[in-house]
Image (cartoon, coloured by chain):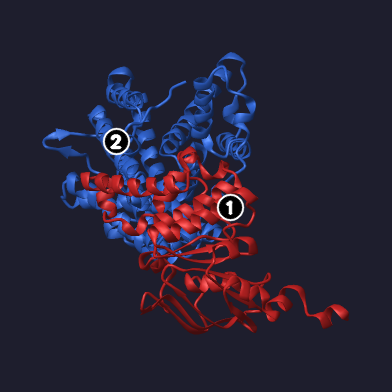
Amino acid sequence: MRVVFKTSYDRDIDLHEHGLDRGKMLGLVGLMILLPFLVNDYYLAEAANTLIWALAGMGLMIAVGHTGQVSLGHAAFLAIGAYTDAALMNAGVPFLVAFPLAGLLTGLFGAVIAIPAVRMSGIYLAIATLAVFVIVEELILLLEPITGGVSGIAAPSITLFGISFDRYGELHNFYWLILAVVILVTWGYANLMRSPTGRSFLAVRDSEVSARAMGINVTRTRALAFGLSSGVTGLAGALMGHYIGFFNYELFSVFISINLLLVVTIGGLGFIQGAFLGAVLITGMPQVIAILRDGLNASVGVDLGSIPGLDTVLFSVILILFIIFEPTGLYGRWLKIRTWFELFPLARRDMFRRHKTYLKTERMK
Amino acid sequence: MSLLEVEDLAVHFGGVKAVDGVSFAVDQGEVFAIIGPNGAGKSTIFNLISHIYQPTRGRICFDGADITGSKPQDMARLGIARTFQNIELFDHSTVLDNLLMGRHTHRQSNFIQDILFLPSVRREERLHRERVEEVIEFLELEAYRNKRIEGLPYGVRKIVEIGRALAIGPKLILLDEPASGLSVEETQDVAFWIEDMRRDMGLTVLMVEHDMGLVSQVCDRVLAVANGKPLAQGTPHEVQADPHVQAAYLGTPEEVAV
């Protein structure tokens, strides 16, 4: 068991309270940077997709996990990010300008809708955001000159400082670009959560009335959180557009919103790490199911491909099991496993009694 | 001069006159209690002072300024901190973070500086932490510093809530039943802390409390209310001896006879 001996307040303010933790994080980042040399293009593309989902998941996590605002409309913010970025680049704006602008515009849009929407909470907010999603979907079809309407729009290939980041031509460059964005956002997110702004998000989530008593402007805080949330999701949307290459409004269906909610719920609400674990599960599951299906078909001769909707059923079963047995998600489970090893052989079953406390988000007040 | 002046305060919810014509003034450095039977409107008076409710009638003045129309989130900045009858802590955060949340009104940084975690943000965090550590030391919360609220016993949560209110750095602290649900020893601790808040920190304390032992021990003056109306005001002994107060708590002799 490791005891951290703290000698200054800075140890609590730092992102990692122990040098070993920082080392592990650097190791993980190093591994991610070296990934293009370790796996083939198929898996590298999957990893890029997972990172994009993790980015979108972080976006939603700010709203759902850390501020307690459920959103069923985050596919709309993905769409706004993707269309803004693609349309700007088609108009000749370089990626270096178009990409941050896509995030900024999506964030502003999110903050503007948030001003009326954040007065609602729980299921009412979820329905309101769903309505926003429907409106955005219609707008995409109406704004045909910019969005290409039903036929869709192409996200141009990215070139920065003369280096190509093309999705197909230079996949490893594209992957590194995504990784850089994800690392920057994660760093900013972690900073936010150790600063007064992040604490005010948690305060608003856990008790509005005492947040007010602490002098926190609840409406403004929730609008800021929603704006940041949609901004990050917009960045993910822009990258998703480049990843897909050519897309129309159908890419951003309501199922994307639901999958995003699964990412944050299964990953672990209220943990940045949860967005990553959830993204790995959501993007990895179809792969695992496909491999299992092929394996069964080849070895036993059982053809699962003929069963329609198998993936969806498996997804739902996993979600239900998580809500019943592990409300803190994959990351909560990981924390318990880690504690067990750290305390070995002193850990007792009682220490891991099931968490009965739910975040207010889940309670649907 | 009085720090807090409440004049003819009233709030009506439809036909229910929860508070009706209550006036009192709390002097700088005083410990003032509001007592009364259940449903008398004590907590409603608190909610009016902290502006969770807007009064139907009357005026609230604090530190020489009329604050009647303010918003609840303005109170901390003015220097009014409060605790809640049914503890309202941030359950999923640690004691330390809860206390740091009390420092919100003292923050200088904006969210962009926070995201970049500029050196100024770190400097500010250290200062907040020093203030919070003073509160932790004062309330002897060292052992719980990094514990999450959801796992803490009731008595400790109660103290953490007082700590969070102190972290705001207020002039006036409103304590809503600070001793309810506490053991005899814990109530004694609260009594000593209230004394220290007044003596060492120069705080003014306004509290709602049922425990008459605690009230007589620490309070300078007491206001008794029943059915939203003021009954009596004075020292704890005067109020306890007042026939109206005794009637409100115990019923009148005629009622008992019937």
In this view, A310 is above or below B217: above
Badge 2 element: helix
- Chain B color in figure: red
Question: Can you see residue A303?
Answer: yes
User: For residue B28, what is the image quadrant?
Assistant: bottom left
Mark 2 nearby-residue class (10 Å; few <14, some 14–19, many ≥20): some
Check disc 1 and report the residue beneath it.
Answer: B188
* Alpha-carbon span between mark 2 and mark 1: 52 Å
User: For residue B151, what is the image quadrant?
Assistant: top right
Badge 1 element: helix
Question: Can you see residue A70?
Answer: no
Disc 2 residue type (three-letter): Ile
Check disc 2 and report the residue beneath it.
Answer: A183
Q: Residue B238, percent across and down?
A: 62, 76
Left or right: A267 with respect to A154?
Answer: right
Chain identifier matching the blue colour in the rendered picture: A
* Depth check, front residue: A83 or A109: A109
